[in-house]
Amino acid sequence: MAGPLAGLRVVELGGIGPVPHAGMMLADLGARVVRVERPLAGPHLGPGERDVLLRGRIRLPADLKSPAGRDAVLAAVDEADVLLDGFRPGVAERLGVGPDTCLARRPELIYCRLTGWGQGGPWADRAGHDINYLALTGTLDALGAAGGPPRPPVNLVADFGGGSMLAVVGILAALHERSTSGRGQVIDAAMVDGVELLSQMLWSLRGTGWWGPERGTNLLDGGAPFYDVYACADGRFVAVGALEPPFYAALLEGLGLTGAGLPPQFDRAGWPALRAALTRAFAAADRAHWVATFEGTDACVTPVLTGAEAAAHPHLRARGTLVEVDGIVQAAPAPRFSRTPADPPAGRHTPPEPDPEPDPKPDPAAEPRSAPPS
């Protein structure tokens, strides 16, 4: 495979949510990723055959609770640079593929453990999902409309932003360090840690008094009328992000509100009156009108697109941000590289499967730590 990670060999212990997302990103950028999955008995399409999070993998059916399955995984580890483990703390050790075992066989291995709560701390052994990690970190409390309950942003923040993205950063950092030391190491990537890193600006705003405790009343959470979503005459929506004064001036000009005697932009006492004026203005015409009005301006007004509309948008089409593979629209590999571009995304590589091993009773403790994508 092409890409800046061509030649990198990864073993991914099959799971859901952030671990396959991290494996996908590594595979997108050229790594050879072997995904370990428990075999299923009888004819079948295979787990997640149409799950685009699993694209670009080589599937290794192996039951880690059997000696043969464990040996097959360890044989793959013997040739790997990276192992992705999404089990709860201690499960990989019980299955015979923990970091001590793997690093003894492959000292240069980067063993990345990705969990919600981390490998240590009083909550390390608890089950959890994206919404739980957001809640404990103080991030969920900041999300939602004024006067309403906190609202989770799908499972994008903890699972993928604070989980898989953090794991990939850790893997790349460990690989860089290995280039000088020649030694592998274990990475403890916890989604609660990643969420707090993503929330660093929020912590900064709190610390400097620019962010109050009431959700939906602040500069970036929909509290400011010039940073919010508005309904148009046709029931569709536009997003407004006119934070800087020149952008705000362009917004007022496009809406025909220049010189309308509105309160100053950053006068919080005047925000209700300003919001009412913006609401009336946007509701007077349909979304297409406002898209045309603000085309080519710096007012930071964009249409709120559906998934289908996004796939057809000229900018995303020109960049190839979304592609269609086997009838499924999906994100293209990113970021872009000038000398070592990645291959276009492909489906899963599925070599012939061996005879399935017996299907043992599931071990709840071996379940991954995060929710599947919604």
Image (cartoon, grey):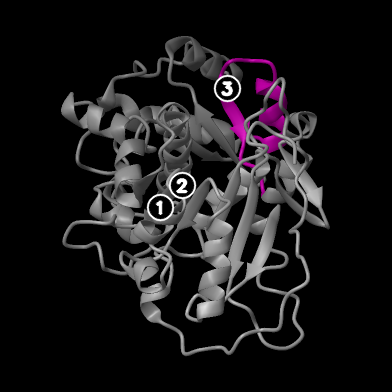
Amino acid carrying mark 3 in the image: Leu
Q: CA distance from mark 2 to mark 3?
A: 58 Å
Question: Residue 350, can we see it?
Answer: yes
Side of 281 relative to 228 (left or right): right
Tell me where residue 71 appears, x and y as whole percent.
Answer: 53, 71
The residue at which mark 3 appears reads as 255
- Per the rendered image, the range of residues in magenta is 285-306
Of marks 2 and 3, which one's residue comes earlier in the chain? 2
The residue at which mark 1 appears reads as 103
Q: Is 198 contained in the magenta span?
A: no
Side of 349 relative to 14 (left or right): right
The residue at which mark 2 appears reads as 109
Asked if the residues shown at circle 2 and circle 3 are in contact, with their CB atoms under 8 angstroms apart, the answer is no
Tell me where residue 314 appears, x and y as whole percent.
Answer: 78, 31
Side of 45 relative to 263 (left or right): right
The residue at the point 30 percent across, 50 percent down is: 192
Q: State whether residue 285 is above or below residue 27.
A: above
Q: State whether residue 50 is above or below residue 354.
A: above
Asked if the residues shown at circle 2 and circle 1 are in contact, with their CB atoms under 8 angstroms apart, the answer is yes
The residue at the point 20 percent across, 31 percent down is: 206
Amino acid carrying mark 1 in the image: Leu
- Mark 2 against mark 3, which lies toward the viewer? 2
